[in-house]
Image: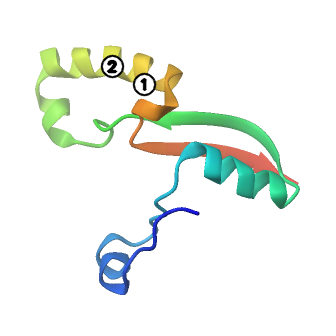
């Protein structure tokens, strides 16, 4: 399940887990957590280049709305769960 990350990658990237949304949801449910929310974030989030270019920023907002609907297009997930 997921992709193994080398020690070197871990040291450089930090808190990284390379698995898809289905795998992560399965692990959460197997550990008896209840999913409160499950949203995706786009590849554009947190990039200062887009913040400085208003036209591109507008396009980014439009794409974000699409990415949130189709998790397979997202570069990351934000999942809120509780026991």
On screen, residue 26 above or below 75: below
- Give the residue furthest to the front: 1
Instruction: Give the structural element (helix, strand or loop) at label 2.
Output: helix
Q: Which mark is residue 67?
A: 1
Q: In whole angstroms, how far apart are the C-alphas of marks 2 and 1? A: 6 Å
CA neighbours of label 1 inside 10 A, class few (<14), some (14 to 19), many (20+): some
Q: Nearer the viewer, residue 16 or 48?
A: 16
Q: Is residue 2 left or right of residue 29?
A: left
Residue 63 shown left or right of residue 51 in the figure:
right
Position of residue 13 measured from the top left corner of the image (x, y, whole percent): 33, 70
> What label does residue 43 carry, if any?
none
Picture coordinates of residue 18, whole percent (x, y):
46, 60
Residue in front for this viewpoint, 53 or 33: 33
Q: Nearer the viewer, residue 75 or 54?
A: 75
Q: Residue at x 82, y 50 (%)?
A: 82
Image quadrant where one finds the N terminus: bottom right
Q: Is residue 19 left or right of residue 14?
A: right
Point 83% across, 61% down: residue:
31
Query: Residue 22: x and y, percent?
Result: 63, 44
Q: Residues within 10 Å of mark 2 (few under 14, many from 20)?
A: some
Quadrant position of the C terminus in the picture: bottom right
Residue for point 20% across, 31% down? 51
**Element marked by disc 1:** helix
Above or below: residue 28 compared with residue 79: below
Q: Residue furthest bottom?
A: 7
Disc 2: which residue: 63
Viewer-closest of 32 and 50 = 32
Q: Are marks 2 and 1 in contact (CB under 8 Å)?
A: yes
Q: Is residue 70 left or right of residue 56?
A: right
Residue 66 falls in image quadrant: top left
Give the residue at x 76% y 48%.
81
């Amino acid at each position: 399940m997921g992709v193994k990350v080398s020690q070197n990658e871990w040291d450089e990237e930090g808190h990284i887990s390379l698995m898809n949304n289905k795998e992560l949801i399965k692990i959460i449910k197997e550990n008896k957590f209840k999913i409160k929310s499950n949203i995706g974030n786009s590849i554009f989030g947190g990039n200062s280049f887009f913040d400085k270019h208003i036209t591109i920023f507008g396009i980014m907002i439009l794409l974000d709305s699409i990415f949130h609907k189709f998790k397979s297009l997202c570069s990351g997930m934000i999942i809120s769960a509780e026991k």
